[in-house]
Image (cartoon, grey):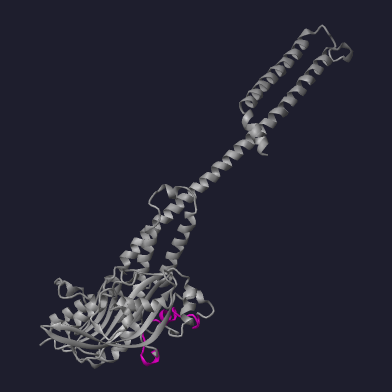
């Protein structure tokens, strides 16, 4: 028997992009556009979340609110905003198999926008099957065709203005919100016929119910519908090891191309997993997946910003305007780590397992470590530059202090000369006073010993004075330029 996919399955397509306009201005533009409905919380595809029990932490959904308490008092607390547009775009997908025309009736429903404060955004839409029990082989062709947004699609009944390319249809929605050349796709392709850039690929998120298959079929289903590859890509034997088995016959599988929930209905005919669980998938699991994609593509964006910094170490050695740019980048990345990276998302264990599994498959932790290495390098650069600035300030302070000391020594030299001159004058007066018989200091003028000692003392004073004057004179002559420049500065 050939494996079939039930029409209760859901196919979501997510297109990541980033924008240059201010976040608040973009939000206002979308709010003013009547076609977009602002959601109070991040409900995923469920407008009325009260119909579905939710287990994810409430603050994760409220983190997208602007008007919802407790965020109404501080709009900057929200990490992003969510909008949704009701849509019903039926189409038929036609292709040939062994000369026979095969048709899958489907419909594109619900277009949504996640806009994050750090200028990362996601446009999503979902496809519903109208045909009953589509063969897996047929669905692989449709998924491969719809994933490649820049290719000509074989869908019939789509609007003529998309030029047969779903990427044009996606871009038309964003053009209603953003100004031209103010947004860019992470993976884009130049549409030469329309002279515009359109998204190249969509990320896939699937809720698949398979029946009439065996164990190998569920692996085929998970691999090809998650990646969007065709049968030309043969998967490795390790694919099953890479899958996360949640329950009997229930698997999660994720790659960089997408992720999905896969139920082998033949093995586990659970009506709950086939029906009611779909609402939880479209609400809780879709929100968790978008949060993980936001982490992944934000890290890509920050890696790009870091790569655009100068590779010449000399640009970081001197203090410049780049100091401010580095400070802003470090602050932005650390704010992202604080507000948008989560280790736990739900009260339920298996939801946290799903979150951790997808996080590991996307390599988010490795990307965070890589960015942190860059941040640590930036911090070291800033520390070295701060130390250099401190050393320069200390050097200038020492130079100023030396100049002040020299100035003080110069002044003290002059004072010393005046003091020595005064001492010499006093010495002459003392000798004269001693030698004058009228003063009667010497009772016997013939006492030559006292007179000799008086002249010796006077001579010593003269000698010391000469030495001091010579030293001060040499110091002044040697430092005359510095001293005069210092006086000019003052």
Question: For this view, does 258 lie left or right of residue 398?
Answer: left
In the picture, which quadrant includes the C terminus?
top right
Which residue occupies the foreground of this view, 62 or 88? 88
Residue 446: percent from left, percent from top: 82, 6
Q: Is residue 58 magenta?
A: yes
Q: Is residue 58 above or below residue 383?
A: below
Q: Which residues are magenta?
A: 49-70
Left or right of 262? Residue 87 is right
Task: Give whichever of 120, 458 is nearer the camera.
Answer: 120
Q: Is any part of residue 292 visible from this angle?
A: no
287 drawn magenta:
no
On screen, residue 417 versus residue 275, left or right, reads right
Furthest-right residue in this view? 438
> Is residue 277 at all visible to an observer of this figure?
yes
Most foreground residue, 231 or 188: 188
Is residue 227 rendered to the left or right of residue 323? left
Percent coordinates x, y for residue 163 in the rendering: 30, 78
For the image, the number of numbered tags is: 0
- The extreme top residue here reads 446
Residue 96 coordinates in the image, percent (x, y): 15, 83
Q: Quadrant of residue 82?
A: bottom left
Q: Quadrant of residue 406?
A: top right
Q: Residue at x 45, y 65 (%)?
A: 332
Please name the predominant secondary structure of the magenta segment in the image.
Answer: loop
Position of the N terminus, as image quadrant, is: bottom left
Q: Is residue 178 above or below residue 6?
A: above
Task: Name above or below for residue 443 compared with residue 5.
Answer: above
Foreground residue, 303 or 25? 25
Residue 92 lies, in percent from the top left, at: 24, 87
């Amino acid at each position: 028997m050939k494996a079939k996919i039930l029409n209760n399955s859901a196919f979501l397509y997510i297109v990541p992009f980033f924008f240059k306009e201010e976040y608040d201005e973009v939000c206002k533009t979308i709010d003013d556009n009547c076609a977009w409905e602002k959601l109070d919380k991040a409900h995923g595809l469920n407008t009325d979340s009260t119909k579905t029990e939710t287990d994810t932490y409430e603050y994760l959904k409220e983190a997208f609110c602007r008007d919802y308490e407790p965020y109404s008092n501080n709009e900057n607390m929200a990490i992003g905003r969510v909008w949704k547009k009701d849509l019903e775009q039926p189409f038929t997908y036609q292709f040939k198999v062994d000369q026979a025309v095969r048709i899958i009736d489907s419909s594109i429903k619900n277009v949504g926008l996640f806009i994050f404060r750090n200028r990362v955004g996601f446009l999503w839409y979902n496809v519903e099957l109208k045909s009953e029990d589509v063969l897996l082989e047929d669905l692989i062709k449709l998924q491969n065709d719809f994933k490649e947004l820049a290719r000509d699609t074989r869908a019939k009944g789509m609007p003529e203005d998309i030029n047969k390319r779903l990427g044009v249809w996606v871009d038309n929605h964003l053009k209603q919100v953003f100004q031209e050349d103010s947004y860019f796709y992470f993976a884009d392709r130049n549409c030469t016929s329309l002279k515009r850039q359109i998204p190249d690929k969509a990320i896939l998120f699937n809720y698949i119910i398979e029946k009439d298959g065996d164990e190998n079929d569920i692996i085929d289903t998970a691999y090809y519908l998650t990646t969007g590859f065709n049968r030309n890509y043969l998967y490795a034997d390790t694919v099953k090891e890479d899958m996360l088995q949640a329950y009997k016959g229930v698997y999660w599988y994720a790659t960089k191309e997408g992720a999905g929930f896969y139920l082998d209905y033949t093995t586990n005919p659970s009506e709950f997993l086939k029906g009611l669980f779909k609402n939880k998938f479209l609400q809780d699991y879709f929100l968790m997946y978008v949060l993980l994609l936001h982490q992944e593509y934000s890290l890509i964006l920050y890696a790009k910003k870091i790569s655009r910094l100068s590779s010449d170490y000399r640009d970081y050695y001197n203090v410049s305007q780049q100091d401010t740019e580095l400070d802003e980048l470090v602050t932005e990345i650390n704010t992202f780590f604080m507000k948008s990276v989560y280790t736990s998302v739900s009260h339920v264990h298996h939801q946290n397992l799903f979150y951790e599994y997808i996080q590991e498959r996307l390599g988010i932790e490795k990307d965070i470590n890589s960015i942190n290495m860059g941040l640590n390098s930036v911090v070291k650069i800033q520390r070295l530059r701060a130390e250099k600035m401190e050393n320069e300030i200390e050097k200038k302070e020492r130079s100023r202090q030396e100049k002040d000391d020299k100035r003080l020594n110069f002044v003290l030299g002059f004072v010393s000369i005046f003091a020595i001159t005064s001492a010499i004058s006093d010495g002459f007066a003392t000798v004269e006073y001693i030698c004058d018989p009228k003063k009667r200091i010497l009772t016997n003028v013939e006492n030559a010993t006292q007179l000799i000692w008086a002249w010796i003392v006077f001579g010593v004073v003269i000698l010391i004075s000469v030495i001091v004057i010579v030293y001060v004179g040499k110091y002044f002559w040697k430092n005359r330029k510095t001293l005069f420049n210092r006086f000019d500065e003052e």
